Amino acid sequence: GQQVMQIPQYQHVQEGEDFTTYCNSSTTLSNIQWYKQRPGGHPVFLIQLVKSGEVKKQKRLTFQFGEAKKNSSLHITATQTTDVGTYFCAGPSAGNKLVFGAGTILRVKS
Amino acid sequence: GAGVSQSPSNKVTEKGKDVELRCDPISGHTALYWYRQSLGQGLEFLIYFQGNSAPDKSGLPSDRFSAERTGGSVSTLTIQRTQQEDSAVYLCASSSTSGGADTQYFGPGTRLTVL
């Protein structure tokens, strides 16, 4: 079945440093979604990308969808302590079910 | 309320007992998912309801786990003869269509502890 792989599993950065997490699918995706889960909280939707090569920005967060629509990335510029949490990517499977990556845990040291 | 709600928020039970976890999705949402999340881990898919179709039960870890969705709205996840390895946070999510393209809205989860 379809797999969505995410790397790295864990990253610890100094406040002010940049951070990137990568998502790769074994199949072409019609869209990709990104979610953020704060410690002790539940996943919250951040954004959806649909078009090949699409780039979207939310303040310090930049989301990209690959040309082949099989990979995506989330880049955070100048991390802040409020960025801590787990970032998940997710894409629809052939069975029309949303499949989540394993997530990347981000810790920010101030 | 406008969001997904789950009850109870916390459940402590003894090994071997049955538990029922409840999820109230956003009104009108046709798709409903259950996930399990162990501490520091990712989202483990359990079951997916979409409209009136037969649910996708492919993620249920054993026959001790079952779920229902009555009237296309409220869902109950039942775990029979609980084991210590069932301890986790159980998350419910709903989305407005039966397709995988739609945003999922998560509830706050039920933290299950099996002693």
Image (cartoon, coloured by chain):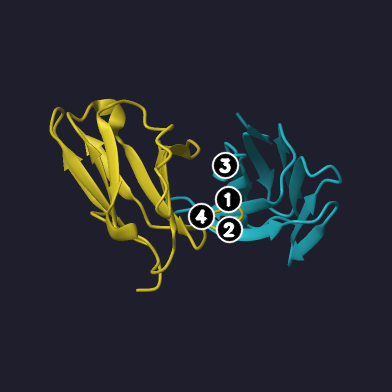
Chain colours: A cyan, B yellow
* Circle 2/circle 1 CB separation < 8 Å: yes
Residue A24 percent across, percent down from the top left: 72, 36
Q: CA distance from mark 3 to mark 4?
A: 17 Å
Q: Which mark's residue is nearer the viewer, 3 or 2?
A: 2
Residue A77 visible in the picture: no
Q: Chain of mark 1?
A: B
- The answer to which quarter of the image holds residue B85 is top left
> Split into 4 quadrants, where in the image is the N terminus of chain A?
top right
Q: Chain of mark 2?
A: B
Decide if residue A35 is on the left or right side of residue A56. left
Query: What is the residue that sits farthest to the bottom in this orientation?
Result: B1
Residue A9 percent across, percent down from the top left: 62, 34
* Circle 4/circle 1 CB separation < 8 Å: no
For label 4, the residue is: B98
Q: Secondary structure at mark 4?
A: loop
Numbered mark located on residue B102 in the image:
2
- The answer to which quarter of the image holds residue A62 is bottom right
- Residue at position x 86%, y 46% in the image: A67
Residue A63 visible in the picture: yes
For label 3, the residue is: A100
